[in-house]
Amino acid sequence: MIIFLILSLSCLTLIIYSYFFKDLIKNKDSLEKQNSYFMTGIIVFVTNFFDKLWIGSFAPLTAILRGLT
């Protein structure tokens, strides 16, 4: 039974990944041209810091992302 579950989940994962990568290759020209790994790292650090303080990370993350756009 467990082998059946693992095999079925593996097959579904491969199917989803195939659709994802086909769509990624198809739309690679329309992706954002932002390569700011430093800014992403700062945002992740701040939101994880708030999450460690038990404040949560969803509200600060959405506020920061809305402020950037």
Image (cartoon, helix red, strand yellow):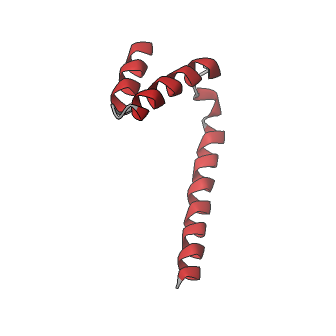
Quarter of image, res 3 = bottom right
Tell whether 43 sits left or right of 22.
left
Q: Position of residue 48 (x, y in %)?
A: 47, 31
Question: Could you tell me which residue is drawn at 60 percent across and 68 percent down?
Answer: 10
Q: Position of residue 14 (x, y in %)?
A: 62, 61
Q: Nearer the viewer, residue 30 or 15?
A: 15
Vertical placement of residue 23 versus 38, above or below: below
Question: Could you tell me which residue is drawn at 58 percent across and 48 percent down?
Answer: 20
Query: Could you tell me how many numbered marks the image carries?
Result: 0
Vertical placement of residue 16 versus 37, above or below: below
Residue 69 in sight: no
**Which residue occupies the extreme front position in the image?**
53
Q: Nearer the viewer, residue 69 or 40?
A: 40
Q: Position of residue 24 (x, y in %)?
A: 62, 41
Quarter of image, res 11 = bottom right
Question: Could you tell me which residue is drawn at 56 percent across and 57 percent down?
Answer: 16
Q: Nearer the viewer, residue 50 or 1?
A: 50
Residue 53 in sight: yes
Question: Could you tell me which residue is drawn at 57 percent across and 61 percent down?
Answer: 13
